[in-house]
Amino acid sequence: MISCDMMSIFFVFPCFQLQEESLEKVIKDTESLFKSREKEYQDTIDQIELELATAKSDMNRHLHEYMEMCSMKRGLDVQMETCRRLITQSGDRKSTSQITVAVDDSNPEEKPHPVPGLSVSSDLDEALNTHRHIAGSLE
């Protein structure tokens, strides 16, 4: 014979079975929700990592461009200093040649002769042309 306790378990069992099925459904729904959220989060992480890689690549490119510009600037600074020196030397030599002309002015028919090996104007023209070429490549 089956005792009363056992009988009550059989009657209650369908109720437990319904609760168990309901809990299993809640668990499956929750797992599904968390899996979809996990996929969304992973997609967001992947997108951020891609953007980070792109930003790093852009920064690297900008760094190289900046270094190239600094190198060009240093070259231009050297060219400008060369031009300044040539202009200063040219001014000093013109002052000297004007004094010479003033001293040699006793014979008005004679013209001053260029000093051999002095090519300040051609050096200055060359420096200015180089400067223009470099400046043009920056545009």
Image (tube, rainbow, N blue to C red):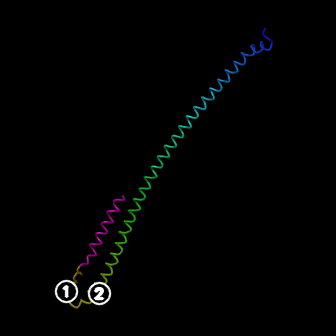
Residue 66 in percent (x, y) is at 43, 58
Mark 1, residue position:
110
Mark 2, residue position:
99
The quarter holding residue 112 reads bottom left
Residue 106 in percent (x, y) is at 23, 91
Residue 88 in percent (x, y) is at 35, 77
Q: Is residue 27 left or right of residue 69?
A: right
Taking 28 as reference, is 8 above or below it?
Answer: above
Three-letter amino acid code at the position of disc 2 = Ile
Q: Is residue 121 magenta?
A: yes
Q: Residue at x 61, y 29 (%)?
A: 31
Q: Residue at x 35, y 75 (%)?
A: 85
Residue toward you, 97 or 69: 69
Q: Residue at x 70, y 21 (%)?
A: 19
Label 1 vs 2, first from the N-terminus = 2
**Range drawn in magenta:** 117-139
